[in-house]
Amino acid sequence: MSPRNKEISEEMRAHSRAALINAARKLFAETGYFNCRISDIARQAGMSQGNVYWYFSSKEELLKAVLAEAFDSMGAVMAQAASGDGPARQKLDALLDGLLEYAHSSSEFTAILISLMGHGKEDSFTRLGFDMEQIGLGYTQSVLSILTQAQAEGVVRSDLDPLALTMMFFGLFNGLNLVYGQEWLALPTHTLKESMYRLFGVIT
């Protein structure tokens, strides 16, 4: 196989794999992971059931791919906001804007998490090979670094514990998603950001 043909073949495989992940994410969100069948995913992706197994050994492997994509995307939003060279207020804006935009575009991911937790399957993450403590640590470090800089620059009250603020921040996001699904995103963005700034103790 020539290098060009090999490149085309790899692109086709990547396209097919992405199509299966997208189809699985959509169906897991709409019908619930446990109610979805491999044949349903194949039909949604416009492929045969045999083709699904060419890329993924099981429905569980598809779930792992869907979750990994979501965890990585959310982590990238926070890491990008924290790694900039700008002032803390700019980083806070980037953090909140990025996470709110992600929340608007990831309704399927939220629905999948609620479906798993509704079945008492929080341990699914561990079984799939995710180290949730490590993932959470990465998220925490990004937000914590922004808040620590914000306190040093006088943007956030210095008498507040930045780690406690970080934990409350994630608790707020998780609570809104679990209790209200996507309904809370109907609130005006400026209202949501103002509430989160109050949580952070931002000095205006």
Image (spheres, grey):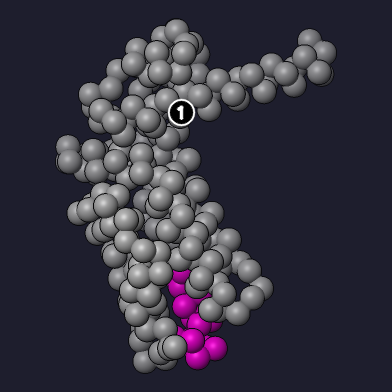
Residue 141 visible in the snapshot: no
Q: Is 47 in front, or is 167? A: 47
Query: How many discs mark residues in the rendered view?
Result: 1
Residue drawn at point x = 50 percent, y = 59 percent: 98
Q: Main SS type for the magenta part? A: helix
Is 83 positioned to the left or the right of 146 in the image? right
- Residue 14 is situated, as x and y percent measured from the top left of the image, at 60, 25
Is 87 positioned to the left or the right of 177 in the image? right
Q: Is 163 in front, or is 44? A: 44
Whether 147 is among the magenta residues is: yes
In the rendered structure, which amino acid carries the disc numbered 1? Ile
Residue drawn at point x = 81 percent, y = 18 percent: 4
- Please provide the residue range marked out in magenta: 142-156
- Residue 107 is situated, as x and y percent measured from the top left of the image, at 36, 44
Residue 5 visible in the snapshot: yes
The N terminus - image quarter = top right
Q: Is 79 rendered above or below residue 117?
A: below
Residue 27, quarter of picture:
top left
Residue drawn at point x = 52 percent, y = 88 percent: 152
Residue drawn at point x = 47 percent, y = 78 percent: 147
Q: Is 74 rendered above or below residue 93?
A: above
The C terminus - image quarter = bottom left
What residue is pinned by disc 1? 21
- Identify the secondary structure beneath mark 1: helix
- Residue 26 is situated, as x and y percent measured from the top left of the image, at 37, 30
Is 5 positioned to the left or the right of 201 in the image? right
